[in-house]
Amino acid sequence: MTTSTTTAMRTDPLTEPALTRAGAARLDVIDLLRGLVIILMVLDHARDYFHAEAFLYDPVDPARSNLAVFGTRWITHLCAPTFVFLSGVSAYLQRANGKTPTSLSRFLLTRGLWLVFLEITLVSLGFNFGPVLFMQVIWAIGASMVLLAALTWAPPAVVGALGAVIIIGHPALAGVDAADFGSWGLLWGFMMELTLIPGLGFVAYPLLPWAGVMFLGYGLGGLFLKAPQERRRTVLFVALGMLAAFAVLRGFNVYGDPVPWSIQASPERTAMSFMNLFKYPPSLLYVLATLGVSLMLSLPLEHLKGLPARVLLAFGRTPLFTYVLHIYVLHLGALAIAAATGFDPSILINFVVDPSRTVKAGWGFGLPMVYLLWALTIAALYPLSAWFAGVKRRRRDWWLSYL
């Protein structure tokens, strides 16, 4: 074997197993699934920045959308629940790999606070290129970690059961409004509703329902340590159970989502109505459908080889790095393309606060161009994520667990 071949094998994530900070082997299936949803997340944000119709209507509105736009938006619904769920699984795996409840609690508290800080600074700035608090999935993961830090002494099954109770029970509180609490309404909003923060921004991801998803991941983390064949059977059972529960509850419009489906003018619009699930906050049916699909996707991902696996592993082993990086790549790319095509780039500054300026200017492209720009963004991100995955694979520095 030549020296160059040996060197290539040492740097290939498929031939050299990656380790956690504690020295335990990483589970490729988790990194592959996380990498897949990162790629889908980039698609979602590419649509926000580049699609001409992004702010003309809700892309999952069955009355106004079409199957291509609806499908593009719906598949990206997998991202946030999977990120949050796998964060809970990862916390469980740290416990299983030897962290004491005290050390795990300390890590979850400090990393959670770090993520919240990043959300309100670097991430919000990247999305908006102007002052705004834009509290999305990174905030939800960080704040949920802070809550989980208080539960590390409880058995994982108890934490998972608490998560299930939150996921199942919080839709029953949908009729409660923040205004009902007077001066305490903002706190209720942070916990339960999509909420405006006057003069500052808004909370797109209310904490409690997302914390329930993380707690559920923590409670189910043990199934990923089972022998491969048993793990696949269990994951399949859980995924099918989620999807079956979704189908029954949604079919009868019984419970679990504030917007019931209805017969529309055509079969495809009826299908869109059936699958139009509430995300802000995530309804029970939204969580069942998205996590059910994600867990199903994890089964074939285990067998992925070659370049597709390398790409997913590179992204899945550097989720925070890639997340922050993609925001700036997309936003700077949008500014550059706007300038090159005769638009005033300032329409993409303070973008989150006032997207109407892009609509008035006629900014954006058709969906095929959005997909092309998405693919080019993935191609630009991959070398950087692969490089950082290599850094994390070679080094055990404590601070790398915060990136």
Image (spheres, helix red, strand yellow):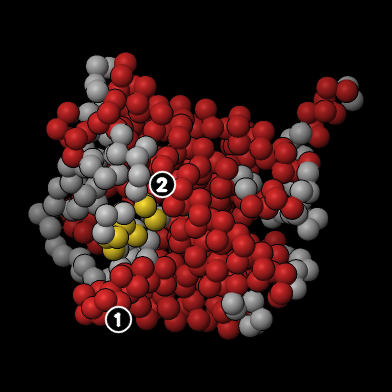
In front here: 121 or 227?
121
Mark 1 or mark 2: whose residue is earlier in sequence: 2
Q: In this view, does 378 lie above or below 256?
A: above
State whether residue 202 appears in this view.
Answer: yes
- 1 vs 2, front mark: 2
Q: In this view, does 284 lie above or below 130?
A: below
The amino acid on which the numbered mark 1 sits, given as a three-letter code, is Ala
State whether residue 367 appears in this view.
Answer: no
Residue 74 pos. (x, y %): 33, 51
Residue 6 pos. (x, y %): 85, 29
Q: Tell me the quarter of the image containing the N terminus.
A: top right
Q: Residue 372 carries which label?
A: none
Residue 104 pos. (x, y %): 69, 69
Quadrant in the rendering for residue 72: top left
Q: In screen coordinates, is 42 left or right of 276?
A: right
Residue 222 pos. (x, y %): 66, 71
Q: Which residue is drawn at 38% across and 41% down?
A: 127
**Secondary-structure class at tag 2:** helix
Q: Distance between the residues labelled 1 and 2?
A: 31 Å
The amino acid on which the numbered mark 2 sits, given as a three-letter code, is Ser
Q: Is residue 76 above or below residue 372?
A: below
Q: Residue at x 35, y 73 (%)?
A: 187
Q: Which residue is drawn at 74% across and 35% down?
A: 12
- Which residue matches tag 1? 172
**Secondary-structure class at tag 1:** helix
Quadrant in the rendering for residue 140: bottom left
- Which residue matches tag 2? 124
Q: Are marks 1 and 2 in contact (CB under 8 Å)?
A: no
In front here: 344 or 214?
344
Number of numbered markers: 2
**Mark 2 crowd level (few <14, some 14–19, many ≥20, 10 Å Cα):** many
